[in-house]
């Protein structure tokens, strides 16, 4: 009985954690999966958004989720700027992803140092009515609990993923975004400007950091370097789900979330990353394109 | 009402000049063949018209509905917006997208989006094979089917001038004949002006109203009509090595 209670609670927590992971990965799925930009700074940019959420909450008393919505267009514009720099100094000159990696690595360190200079290395939290509370149900003597902060992350991540997925599959811009890494020259013959498509799609990827940052500070206390712990996870999720597939990223995030939750509950948290990457390697061995990959093994 | 006039065009890649003072005209509603073997500048000329290469000298003018548009300084996007579509050499499909997604991307320009349903219907009528394969990934189709898709995708932009670069390349002889026939068909049914670069002389002259022979980046022969082209000795010596 106790085991069953533990198992079900671990599954619930895992699904919710998966939603949170999806929110962290969805932007990277666009930048890396569709645009070939190895944005290793993605989690750190999310931490930046989390600190912005902290300021809006701490100074103005704005609800963190509302703050995340306010930050979304700000990070969209930030993404336009970052892509312009990236294109100007890296992508235009050579197609090598490795040079781009250097750019994003630099961005990661600069962003971290700036945050340390402003906020120091202390952990920060936000306050909202739903943080620290749980929905608890007692069924046949077993107690199940759903933390509201994780539930909020799950719901928002789900809506964000479905929204982006729908937009990319049903709009002219979305179809051009999935075509742009396949053949830029052919896309320009369709009357689309490939560089503009990439800039807007990249900005859309970074716009998700606004909400993801708000969710991050709702779920965990943050400090400037916390993004590093998520680099492995988010890349593993995008590759597991399949490069170029937004729904795949959601599924990948849920799988890793459930796996990490189960392993943490029964074997201890230190095993969680090993199991996550074990799953990734196992899937890639049998399906090199990831679960929902489009057949492109770049 | 579309007409293309190219005058004294000079273009190339870096320091290598490929086209030397090329002049040609494509009259409204006609099919003009640009004939020549590999490496003589056919594709370079097509790319110049589509805006993918910037010529170093000369002019490219597109006449449409009484307006004269200078294409030299326009971007590929602007050129598509004028109603000019290129079926590029090697097809350049989006291999991981389905047939239908490829076609829908063809209708990307604003003016084409309003007519997308009608255009898709037209393409499926012209190439029924594509309708059967609409959910299939473009990269997994045969060469002939891919060439159909490449032509259909260009037609999705509702062009007034269609540039086709070597529709016969890599196809079995029977498919070449079919493809050329289809191009002739669509020129009539859609009233589209066509400039077609081709190596396959015998097939191209079946539908061409006129033709040019390009040798080493220069127009070696410009025909007045189809008969004139078929009778020309230059063609025979050029193709048969006589």
Image (cartoon, rainbow, N blue to C red):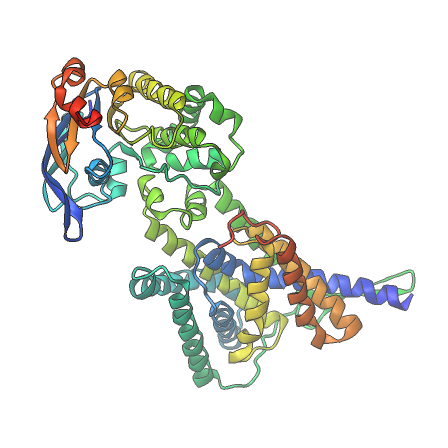
**Image: A57 above or below B64:** below
Residue at position x 70%, y 60% in the image: A15
From the viewer's side, name the closer residue of B235 and A211: B235
Q: Is A32 on the left or on the right of B65, as rendered?
A: right
Q: Is A165 on the left or on the right of A3, as rendered?
A: left
**Image: A223 above or below B172:** below
Residue at position x 11%, y 24% in the image: B222
From the viewer's side, name the closer residue of A27 and A59: A27
x then y, percent, for residue B155: 35, 28
**Image: A152 above or below A267:** above
The answer, for residue A151, to whether it is visible in the render is: no
x then y, percent, for residue B36: 21, 31
Which quarter of the rendered picture does the N terminus of chain B lie within?
top left
From the viewer's side, name the closer residue of B33 and B73: B33
Residue A238 lies in quadrant: bottom right
The answer, for residue A283, to whether it is visible in the render is: yes
x then y, percent, for residue A93: 29, 62
What count of labels does the image hold? 0
Which quarter of the rendered picture does the C terminus of chain B lie within?
top left
Q: Is B178 on the left or on the right of B73, as rendered?
A: right
Q: Is B38 on the left or on the right of A81, as rendered?
A: left
Residue that extends furthest to the front in the rendered view of this protein: B242
Residue that extends furthest to the top in the rendered view of this protein: B227
x then y, percent, for residue A71: 46, 64
**Image: B224 above or below A193:** above
């Amino acid at each position: 009985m106790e085991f069953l209670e533990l198992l079900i609670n671990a599954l619930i927590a895992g699904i919710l954690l998966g939603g949170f992971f999806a929110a962290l990965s969805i932007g990277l799925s666009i930048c890396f999966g569709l645009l070939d930009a190895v944005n290793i700074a993605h989690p750190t940019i999310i931490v930046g958004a989390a600190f912005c959420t902290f300021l809006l909450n701490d100074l103005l008393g704005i609800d963190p989720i509302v703050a995340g919505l306010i930050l979304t267009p700000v990070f969209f514009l930030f993404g336009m700027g970052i892509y312009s720099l990236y294109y100007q100094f890296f992508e235009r000159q050579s197609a090598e992803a490795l040079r781009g990696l250097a750019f994003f690595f630099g961005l990661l360190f600069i962003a971290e140092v700036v945050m340390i200079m402003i906020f120091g290395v202390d952990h920060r939290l936000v306050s909202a009515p739903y943080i620290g509370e749980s929905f608890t149900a007692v069924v046949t003597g077993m107690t199940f609990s759903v933390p509201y902060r994780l539930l909020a992350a799950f719901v928002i991540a789900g809506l964000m993923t479905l929204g982006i997925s729908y937009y990319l599959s049903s709009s002219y811009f979305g179809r051009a975004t999935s075509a742009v890494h396949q053949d830029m020259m052919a896309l320009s013959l369709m009357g689309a400007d490939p560089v503009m498509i990439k800039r807007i799609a990249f900005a859309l990827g970074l716009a998700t950091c606004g909400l993801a940052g708000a969710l991050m500070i709702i779920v965990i206390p943050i400090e400037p370097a916390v993004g590093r712990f998520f680099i492995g996870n988010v890349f593993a999720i995008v590759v597991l789900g399949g490069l170029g597939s937004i729904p795949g990223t959601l599924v990948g995030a849920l799988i890793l979330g459930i796996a990490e939750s189960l392993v943490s509950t029964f074997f201890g948290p230190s095993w969680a990353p090993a199991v996550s990457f074990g799953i990734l390697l196992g899937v890639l061995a049998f399906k090199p394109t990831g679960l929902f990959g489009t057949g492109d093994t770049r | 009402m579309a007409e293309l006039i190219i005058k004294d065009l000079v273009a190339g890649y870096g320091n290598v000049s490929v086209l030397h003072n090329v002049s040609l005209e494509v009259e409204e509603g006609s099919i003009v063949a640009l004939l020549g073997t590999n490496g003589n500048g056919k594709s370079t000329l097509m790319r110049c018209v589509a805006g993918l290469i910037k010529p170093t000298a000369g002019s490219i003018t597109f006449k449409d509905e009484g307006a004269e548009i200078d294409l030299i300084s326009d971007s590929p996007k602007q050129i598509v917006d004028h109603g000019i579509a290129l079926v590029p050499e090697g097809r350049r499909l989006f291999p991981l997208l389905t047939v239908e997604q490829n076609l829908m991307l063809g209708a990307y320009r604003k003016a084409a989006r309003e007519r997308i349903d009608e255009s898709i219907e037209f393409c499926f009528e012209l190439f029924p094979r594509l309708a059967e394969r609409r959910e299939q990934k473009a990269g997994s189709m045969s060469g002939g089917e891919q060439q159909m898709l490449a032509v259909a995708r260009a037609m999705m932009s509702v062009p007034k001038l269609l540039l086709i670069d070597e529709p016969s390349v890599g196809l079995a002889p029977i498919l070449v004949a079919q493809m050329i026939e289809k191009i002739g068909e669509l020129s009539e049914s859609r009233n589209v002006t066509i400039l077609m670069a081709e190596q396959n002389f015998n097939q191209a002259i079946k539908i061409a109203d006129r033709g040019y022979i390009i040798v080493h980046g220069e127009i070696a022969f410009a025909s007045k009509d189809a008969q004139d082209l078929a009778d020309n000795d230059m063609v025979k010596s050029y193709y048969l090595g006589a």
